[in-house]
Image (cartoon, helix red, strand yellow):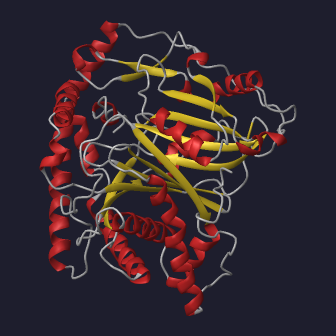
Amino acid sequence: MDATFLYVETPSNQTHMTGVLVFDPSTMKDGYSWDRMREFVKSRLGRAPAFTRKLARVPFDLAHPVWVEDPDFDMDAHLHRVAVPKPGGPRELADLAGQIAGWPLDRSRPLWDMWFVEGLEHGHIGLVAKMHHSTIDGVSGSNLMMHLFDLEPDPAPVETPPPPSERMPTDAELLARGLWSRAKRPLLLPNALINTARAGAELVRRRVVRTEPGMAAPFSAPPTPWNAPITPHRRVSFTSVSLADIRAVKDGFGTTVNDVILAVCAGALRRWLDSHGGIPPRPLTAGVPVSTRGDDEAGGFGNLVSAMFVSLATDVDDPVERLQMIHDGTKNAKEEFRAVGADVLTNWTEFSGPRSFGLAVRLYSRMELADRHPPALNLIVSNVPGPPIPLYLAGGRLQALYPLGPVFDGMGLNITVLSYMESVGFGFLACRELVPELWEMSEGVADALDELVARVKANGRSAKPVSTKAPSTKSRKPAAQ
């Protein structure tokens, strides 16, 4: 799975994860300075191997690339200092993040970059951080944050080990590894075939006996403006809403937090589509990543993730009915997902030839084939639980956090959601040419949630007091301000 995110990358299709963070330097012991920030980051690099390892290609692409410690690691090649123009608000920060998100990472170095952003309103400091998806998924990316952040502004010093020093493997050693990997593949094939046949039979059985809808079928999604070939250019917007409001809706209508987030995204997408060509008669289909990380793998890196296909019920006018349909759909999709098994498709990635797979993806992109078939999915909606307690970066208190996932050819929109303390940050990333007025879409998040909160209040079904301090984004300053 890690290697797959390398193979699907093209000049237009960058597969890194991006985070936009805003922190308050007033809590820093000696105040903010670029030199102190550099020293702080340097002191934390030894806490996670993801910061100092790079890719080594196996000769003749006989096997997937391997991670090796970079003997020439240069921290200054990954840390950058930049300022935004006045007034330094969310839109200026998002414009910068969109430019950075469209730039590829240098594969000859460790696959991450950090841009510290000065000039924000209220003296705040921003951070736009990128790391390649071959290194982290949503959960491991959240875990990686904990190596940079502290739980208090002035923690006791902890000795951090220096980055490990390892010898670079020779081409002969990499070649031997590739040959051994190739030799093992036939041994894995029978198990993959058996598991796939079992999963297929179970899926057919469930579809035959089930009367309720299950997981949404791929290639049944309607076309939208962003389901087209993409360019390298990105557009970013973000917003945050009250976690208390989301929980109140969840409790009031007996759903889950994830159901409410999907319903809120569906409401925001309906509003945008209604003012940009009309709402499709068929419901949008979202790919919803699902972590397959066990308890013994909770602190690891890399990708342990699969995905469900979920109908967003965007063809339904009533927001509560839409929420209930999403709840029923995700419940049945989860049952199918568990019955089929999370590793059925991911196991087959071991049999993909790196060169042939990459060529196929580049050919698909170059020929703009995304315009010649129905969308497999309309977009990705990813929801990751974040830290419920305040975090500090070099003593500066984290004020806001917005995650941004990648887009793909034929699917030029991604919504990634991460909670932090009592707020939930929604990060929107889109192909710039396909989705104009992206802020209009993100502003619809608060409006969609307000509709559901109002219905909870009207029904008198709120199990908890509904927060009143998170009005619509149109009248509320985003958390970045």
Q: Quadrant of residue 13?
A: top left
The picture places residue 98, in percent across and down from the top left corner, at 48, 39
Instruction: State the image coordinates of residue 395 (x, y, percent, origin top left).
Output: 79, 38
Nearer to me, 442 or 334 = 442
For the point 50% across and 82% down, the residue is 254
Depicted 45 relative to depicted 269: above or below: above
Q: Position of residue 299 (x, y in %)?
A: 55, 43
**What residue do we see at 36% from left, 70% from top?**
330
Q: Position of residue 347 (x, y in %)?
A: 26, 43
338 over 83 or under it: above or below: below
60 lies left or right of 133:
left
**Residue reaching furthest to the bottom:** 459
| Left or right placement of residue 241 versus residue 40 in this view | left
Instruction: Tell me which residue sits at (78%, 31%) in the image.
Output: 158
Residue at x 53%, y 72% (from the top left corner): 449
Would you identify the image quadrant in which residue 478 lies? bottom right
Q: Nearer the viewer, residue 182 or 130?
A: 130
Identify which residue, 177 or 94, lies in the foreground. Answer: 94
From the viewer's perspective, tell me whether residue 24 is left or right of residue 75: right
Front-lying residue, 410 or 179: 410
Could you tell whether 107 is left or right of 474 in the image?
left
Q: Quadrant of residue 129?
A: top right
Q: Work out which quarter of the rendered image holds the N terminus and state it.
A: top left
Res 260 visible: yes
Does residue 299 appear anywhere in the picture?
no
Q: Residue furthest right?
A: 29
Which residue, as the protein is rendered here, is positioned at the far left? 372
Q: How many marks?
A: 0
